[in-house]
Image (spheres, rainbow, N blue to C red):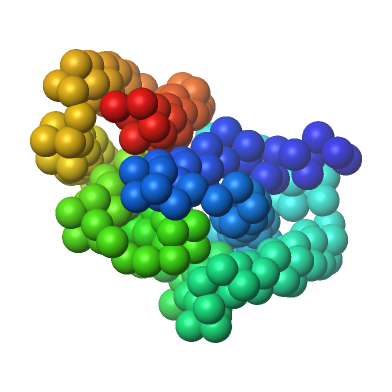
């Protein structure tokens, strides 16, 4: 039973949530405003929000008949009968309530105007798979990921630690967009793997709509654009030797992309994890360059 719940959390994808907060914290360090407590709250809030989204995705896809046993992706506890639908629904709503309370504490540092931002994040966590127009069912998942796993966590993690929007256009926003593109690539691999299953049940992800070949090129260009954005915000500020990190990213990104193009089904699961980990390591690189560079 515990194993089924751990699988439902999809731990392999959680570095995506952590990366956005870490990159935002890197920007806060550059702006001279690192603050430990709001950093921890932002990190926990982001991680729990993604787990809520993963739980909701599993519950609502089962409820809507979009999952079937023996699918290529990670094992779905509800579909396979390991977790009851009612238990998953209660876990989703309970964790969402807890995460909302955790997010409310950020008002202490950022002000009451953060409330609508938190509401938007909560609605996204559910609206990705639920509601009258689930984003993941209409080819909008990648756009939502760019916003809620890139721009929002980077910009607002920086803001609640620094208390200002200094360097927003020249640093924080492009970093957020770059991390968002990397996060979108994680979803592309997920949908690339599940395309046949999704098409069979009428789930119209971007890969189902545009095809694997097109989305494989989107994956490639997302990584290139993300790298160019990071070069743009760092090359004039820090020693050029730090660009070894971007060159390493490009090489690893290319290697993973080539393997994605040659892989199918469950072979893509480790590549999904590697795409998420590459995003996470990029955020660590940003912290290093902002702290030392």
Picture coordinates of residue 225 (x, y %)? 16, 41
Residue 150 vs residue 207, the one in the foreground? 150
Residue 131 vs residue 104, the one in the foreground? 104
User: In the rendered image, which quarter is residue 196 located in?
Assistant: top left
Left or right of residue 204, residue 235 in this image: left
Identify the residue at horizontal 62%, vertical 40% (top origin).
10
Picture coordinates of residue 34 (x, y %)? 49, 48
Q: Residue 283, relative to residue 144: is it above or below?
A: above
- Residue 141 appears in the picture as rendered: no
Identify the residue at horizontal 82%, vertical 45% (top origin).
82
Left or right of residue 206, residue 82 in this image: right
Q: Residue furthest right?
A: 1
Q: Residue 2, relative to residue 238: is it above or below?
A: below
Left or right of residue 109, residue 283 in this image: left
- Looking at the rendering, in which quadrant would you find the C terminus? top left
- Residue 269 appears in the picture as rendered: yes
Left or right of residue 122, residue 197 in this image: left
Residue 127 vs residue 228, the one in the foreground? 228
Picture coordinates of residue 275 (x, y %)? 40, 30
How many numbered dots are placed on residues in this image?
0
User: In the rendered image, which quarter is residue 261 located in?
Assistant: top left
Identify the residue at horizontal 20%, vertical 30% (top origin).
238
User: In the rendered image, which quarter is residue 1 located in?
Assistant: top right
């Amino acid at each position: 039973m515990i194993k089924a719940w751990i699988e439902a959390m999809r731990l392999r994808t959680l570095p995506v949530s952590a990366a956005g907060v870490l990159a935002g914290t890197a920007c806060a360090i550059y702006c001279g405003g690192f603050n430990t407590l709001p950093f921890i709250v932002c990190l926990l809030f982001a991680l729990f929000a993604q787990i809520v989204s993963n739980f909701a995705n599993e519950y609502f896809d089962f409820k809507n008949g979009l999952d079937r046993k023996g699918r290529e992706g990670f094992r779905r506890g509800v579909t396979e009968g390991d977790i009851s639908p009612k238990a998953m629904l209660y876990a989703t709503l309970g964790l969402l309530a807890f995460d909302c309370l955790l997010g409310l504490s950020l008002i202490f540092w950022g002000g009451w105007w953060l409330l609508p931002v938190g509401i938007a994040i909560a609605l996204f966590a559910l609206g990705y798979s639920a509601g009258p127009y689930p984003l993941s069912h209409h080819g909008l998942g990648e756009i939502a990921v760019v916003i809620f796993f890139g721009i929002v966590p980077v910009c607002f993690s920086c803001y609640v630690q620094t208390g200002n929007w200094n360097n927003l256009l020249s640093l924080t926003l492009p970093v957020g967009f770059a991390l968002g593109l990397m996060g979108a690539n994680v979803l592309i691999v997920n949908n690339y793997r599940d395309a046949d299953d999704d098409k069979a049940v009428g789930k119209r992800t971007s890969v189902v709509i545009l095809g694997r070949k097109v989305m494989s090129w989107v994956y490639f260009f997302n990584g290139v654009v993300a790298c160019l954005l990071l070069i743009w915000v760092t090359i004039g500020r820090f020693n050029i030797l730090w660009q070894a990190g971007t060159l390493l990213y490009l090489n690893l990104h290319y290697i993973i992309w080539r393997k994605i193009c040659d892989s199918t089904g469950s072979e893509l699961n480790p590549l999904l994890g590697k795409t998420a980990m590459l995003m996470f390591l990029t955020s660590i690189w940003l912290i290093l360059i902002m702290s030392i560079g």
